[in-house]
Image (cartoon, grey):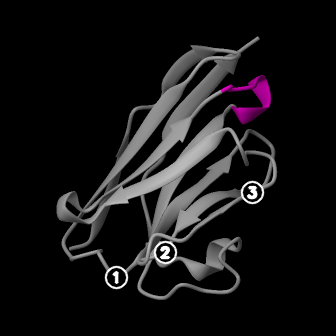
Amino acid sequence: QVQLVESGGGLVQAGGSLGLSCAASGHTFSTYAMGWFRQAPGKEREFVAVISWSASTYYADSVKGRFTVSRDNAKNTVYLQMNSLKPEDTAVYYCVADSHFSSMYYNPVSYYYWGQGTQVTVSS
């Protein structure tokens, strides 16, 4: 059974940094697109970042230059390093994966596998 398990969420002050990890199990994800979405209270789920099997990366404009997505295929793990955090980054962050890299990588429907989410709270 495929599972994505996020870790690393927590509370941080504005301007600080936080790193998230997502460990995948039940399949070899080296050829999968893997990434991150987030959802703040009362808002729709939104795209954050994605990394293709060939390590091409794509970011939402709101996080570009502050967040970095990376992967370690040997560990079946994808990471999200978040720097210069802002209160508006507060959300539940979800790890995602799919066997295909879609041109609509920013759309939640492009991902079959989802983690359970991890809370990130940025205080002002």
What residue is drawn where x is 54% and y is 71%?
Answer: 56
Coordinates of residue 99 in the picture (x, y in percent) = 41, 86
- Magenta-drawn segment: 84-89
- Asked which quadrant contains residue 53, the reply is bottom left
Q: Amino acid at mark 3?
A: Ala
Helix, strand or loop status at disc 1: loop
- Residue assigned mark 2: 52
Q: CA distance from mark 3 to mark 2?
A: 15 Å
Q: Earlier in the sequence, mark 2 or mark 1?
A: 1
- Residue assigned mark 3: 60
- Residue assigned mark 1: 31
Classed neighbour count for the residue bearing mark 3: other residues with Cα under 10 Å, few (<14), some (14–19), many (≥20):
some
- Asked which quadrant contains residue 40, the reply is top right
Q: CA distance from mark 2 to mark 1?
A: 8 Å
What residue is drawn where x is 43% and y is 77%?
Answer: 54
Task: Classify residue 95 as left or right of residue 50.
Answer: left
